[in-house]
Amino acid sequence: MLINNKTYRTIWYDNISQSVKIIDQTKLPFKLEIISLKNLDDVIRAINEMKVRGAPLIGATAAYGIYLAFKELKNKRKTIKAASKIKETRPTAINLFWAVNKMLSKIDDNLNMNEIEKVLFKEAQEICENDIEQCKKIGKNGLEIIKKIYKDKKEKVNILTHCNAGWLATIDWGTATAPIYFAKKSNLNVHVWVDETRPRNQGASLTSYELNNEGVKNTIITDNTAGLLMQRGQIDLCIVGADRVTNKGHVANKIGTFMKAVIAKEFNIPFYVAIPTTTIDWKTESYEDIIIEERADAELSQITGLDEENKIKTIKIYPNDSKVYNPAFDITPNKFISSFITDKGIINANYKEIARLKDE
């Protein structure tokens, strides 16, 4: 997708520097900075510090992490041990575990070290390419939902999204934003209400940023504004992404998602979750079994922006003696979800339909 009219992906391999390149998302929207990941420690740091974020992108970065680890270690046992360190970075995002396990499955004892290295590199690249294709399919499937609303309404379609499930959270196109981008390319009149998404403001900093670059009309709102807009009939549908979906259709996503889903149900507004099938946790049924990541106090007690001299600055906004509780995710039970928009079609949020995706 576009940044300043130039096409980018969120992650790619640079043959000249022999390193993985990423967009440092902690610097957006004020500065576009490309950084290099040259080894496993770089990958772990990038994931932990949220220089990359979003379940699909975390998975792709982890895949390259396994490749870089094996390239350096040239040892299967040590690479498996290194993989456990990657898995410890972000416990809620299922794509991380899926990608690491998929990479480890390619380490064949019958191959020599150079052959294994080539296989791992190819697999990491394929994970990225497959993610792009999955997001395109999500976009095309979700477009049909927006088209129907536009046809019935015959005027602008207002869409609420939460956090950033855009192309910056994937390799390209995004999950929740993919239908929006396809709608824009189909010349449909769409407008996006962008939750700022505290505490890291990923909606305001990232979603609005990428929508602006693609020419999609959008308005940033505080996280507490959506209820008023729904009450006034100013939201036609909600589309969010997910970091993990259980096999019964319960959704772990950025904190605040559950609250929006409950209000949407109250006002009969469809609430869609856009996911690639790689985000489904096929083994977990109960949402009580999902580990909810808790992040640092500073994410909540501090805020980053531009000062009067146009310099990026972080300031404290809470009293020094105030306690902070900062869970990164919440869980939306399946009864609040209208449908899943997946790369394999639009399905209901229940065990039977989700299981069918695994068989396809």
Image (cartoon, grey):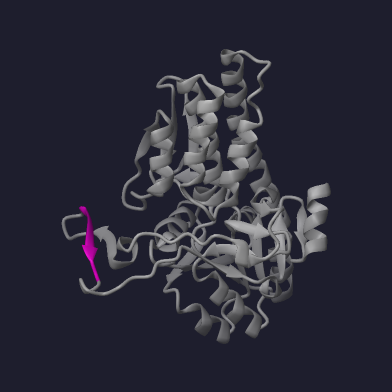
Asked if residue 236 shows in the view, the reply is yes
Position of residue 133 relative to residue 91, above or below, is above
Q: Residue at x 51, y 24 (%)?
A: 70
Tell me which secondary structure the magenta stretch mostly adopts: strand
Position of residue 8 relative to residue 189, above or below, is above
Asked if residue 139 shows in the view, the reply is no
Position of residue 119 relative to residue 327, above or below, is above
- 30 sits left or right of 269 in the view: left
Q: Residue at x 58, y 81 (%)?
A: 263
**Where residue 25 appears, x then y in whole percent?**
40, 48
* Residue 28 part of the magenta-drawn span: no
Quadrant of the rendered structure where residue 133 is? top right
- 264 sits left or right of 341 in the view: left
Q: How many marks?
A: 0
Position of residue 256 relative to residue 69, above or below, is below
Quadrant of the rendered structure where residue 283 is? bottom right
- 66 sits left or right of 149 in the view: left
Quadrant of the rendered structure where residue 165 is? bottom right
Question: 133 or 112, which lies in front?
Answer: 112
Magenta stretch bounds: 311-317
Q: Residue at x 59, y 30 (%)?
A: 125
**Where residue 159 appears, x then y in whole percent?**
58, 69
**Where residue 281 appears, x then y in whole percent?**
67, 54
Q: Residue at x 22, y 74 (%)?
A: 321
Residue placed furthest toward the left: 309
Question: 149 or 329, which lies in front?
Answer: 329
Question: 323 or 32, which lies in front?
Answer: 323
